Image (tube, rainbow, N blue to C red):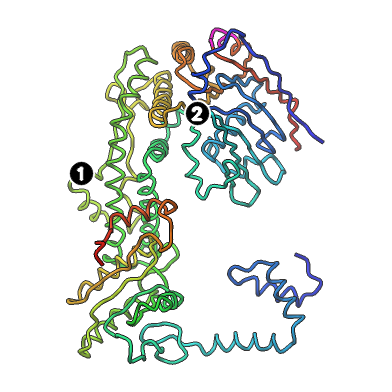
Amino acid sequence: MQFSSKLIENAVGEIAKLPGIGQKTALRLVMHLLKAPEEQSEQLSKAIVKMRQDIKFCQKCHHISDEEVCNICQSPRRDGAIICVVEESQDVMAVENTAQYFGHYHVLGGVISPIEGIGPSTLKISELIHRIEKAKEEDEPIKEVILALSPTMEGDTTAFYLTKKLRAFEDLKITTIARGIPVGGELEYTDEVTLGRSIQARVSFAD
Amino acid sequence: MQKTIVVNRFVVGENNKKSLQSIHSFMFLFNIQLLNFKNYEELNMQFSPQINCLVGENGSGKTNLLDAIHYLSLAKSAFPGQDQQSIRHQEPFFSIRGEFRNEDRQHQVLCALQQGAKKVLRCDQVPYERLSDHVGRFPVVMMAPHDTDLIREGSEERRRFFDAIICQTDRNYLQWLMEYNGLLKQRNALLRQWQKNHMPADQDLLETYNIPLLDRAEKIARARISFLDQFEPLFQAHYQALSGGREEVSLRYRTEVLKEDFKEKFEQATEKDVVLGRTTMGVHRDDFRFLIGGHPVKRFGSQGQQKSFVVALKLSHFDLIHQQKGFKPILLLDDIFDKLDDQRMQHLLKMVAGHKFGQIFITDARPERTKGLVKEIDEEVKIFEIEKGGIQNKE
C-alpha cells in the first residue's frame, strides 16, 4: 500500500500488527482518528500506556487484576476450596459469564507445546502446586481441581501432565469439564469425533 | 489472445455400443477445463465414459493432463513437489474444473490455486472445510513409470502408499494417524530441547506423550494388519494372473509395536532418543515387506517381477475401492506400454476387454501402437492427439 505521509504509514504499520487487523482496516482506523478530535487519540494512547504499565497479575491465581490479589480471590462469597485451572485470563472471563461457578481460578498462561518452546516451567504449574501445598499447611485444604482446558492435543497433554503432578495430593479430587454437543446445536451437524465422544461419555438422564 | 492446443478427435470402432446399463453403473469424468495448469494455458475436453487415449510426443503434456485428473480426485498432484509448481510459468493461478457423472447425477468439481494462497476445492460450488472430505468421492487409481519406487525406495514410501488407502476406508485410522503424528512432533521437539540444553529428561512430561503415543501406535498397527489380511488375497490373485502363476508372493507388515515387551523397550530407548533428538521406536518406523518366494522382491525380484508386483498392488487397490464404494474408480495409465512386457500388457488388455474397468485414460507417445491395440476392444474409444505446437511456453 502506498501512503502519501510517513506519519500515516507508521501509524498504520503499528495498528496492523494487532491480531485480526489488516492494512486496510488499520488505515480506516487511522483516518477515523484523524477526523475525530485530537483528545480522542490522546486518550487512546494514554489508556494503552497506562494499561500496559499499571496492569498487575493476581499473586494467587495469576488472573489480570488491578490489585495485588484479584477481586475473585478476595471475595468472601467464593469457595476457595475449589480451583478451576484455565489457559488464559480470557477463559476466566468466559467461565465467569456462565454464572455457574463460584470457586477460585488458576491461570496457567498457556498449554504445554514443545514445538513452540513452551514447557511446564514456562507455565504457572509449580505455582499451582505450591498453592495447593500452602493451603494444606494452613489447614484450609483444596478439595477439588477442575481442569478447564481446550480439548486440543496440547490441552489434553497439559491436563494429563497436571493430573500426574496432582495425584500426589491425597483427598484432592481432579475433574475435567465435560465435552459434547453444544446446547442448541443440531445432532446431524456435529462432527463425528465430538458426537462419538459424547456417546462414550453419556450420562444418566435422571438428573 | 487465446491460444488453445490443437486436439483432434477420432472415434475408433463404430460398433462399440455397450448396453446403457453398464455405462451407467460407474462413475466417470465427463469433461475437463484447464486454465494455466502446468503447460496448458487453456484447454477444454470432453471424454468418453470408457477408454480415452492421449497420444502425442514426449513433453507435449499427456502426463500433465492425467495429473489434472488426479488433482480433481485427490486434491493433489500425483508427483512429489509443491502445488505452486503446477501453476503455468509466470501466471498467477491455475484452475481445474471437471464434471463427474454417476448414475443420474452430475457433480462439478473445481480445484484452484492462487500463488501464495491456500488451495481451493469445491464441489457443486460448495467449498470443502477439509480437503480430506473430498478424497474418496471420485476415486482414481494411477499406474505410472515411477511406481517401482514403491519397491526401491525406503519404508516411508510404502507406509504412505498403504496409509493413504487405509485412510480412505477407515475414518478412525485417519484420526489416529493425525494424533500420532502430532504427538510424535511434540515429543521430538521436546527431545531436541533436552539434547540441545543438555537437560535431564523430565520423566513425567515424557510419559505425558508416551502414553497416548503408545495407545495410537497399537491401534494403527492393528489396523494395518487387518487391512493386509483383506488386501493380500486380492494382491496374490492379480500377481498370479499377471505372471502366469509361477511365483509365490506375499505382503508382510513388520512392526515391533505389538510385541509384548514393546512398552519396556520403548521406555528403555529414551536415553538413545534424547541423544539423537528423535523418537527411534514406533509405527513411524514400521515397514511393509514385499516378498517373492519368501525373499525381498527389491533384491531378489527381476525387473519384470518388480513391475508385476506394483501393477498387482495397483489393481488390488482398484478392486478394494470397487468393493467398498460399489463403483469402479477411474484408471489412469501413464506410459505403461513402454514399461510393461507383452505378457503383462496382454493381461491388462484382457481385463479391459473383459470390462473389468470403468473409465480409463491411457497415455502413449506412439499413436499407431495405441490405435492398433485398442481397435480390438469392444468399448467406446476416444483418441486425443495432443500437440506441443499448440502449447506456447513463454520463456
Which residue range is magenta in the image? B372-378
Residue at left 70%, top 40%?
A: B89
Q: Is residue B344 above or below residue B64?
A: above
Tell me the subunit letter for badge 2: B
Q: x, y (%) of residue B148?
A: 45, 28
Residue B207, which numbered label?
Answer: none
Residue B145 seen in this snapshot: no
Give the alpha-carbon distance from disc 1 to disc 2, as whole Å.
Answer: 36 Å
Of badges 1 and 2, the one in the foreground is 2
Residue A101 seen in this snapshot: yes
Tell me the subunit letter for badge 1: B
Locate residue B284 relative to residue B59 in the image: left or right: left
Disc 2 on helix, strand or loop? strand
Amino acid tagged 1: Lys
Quadrant of the rendering where the N terminus of chain B is positioned: top right
Residue B377 drawn in magenta: yes
Quadrant position of residue A99: bottom left
Residue B259, which numbered label?
Answer: 1
Locate residue A143 relative to residue B313 in the image: left or right: left
Residue B152 or residue B68, whichever sits in front: B68
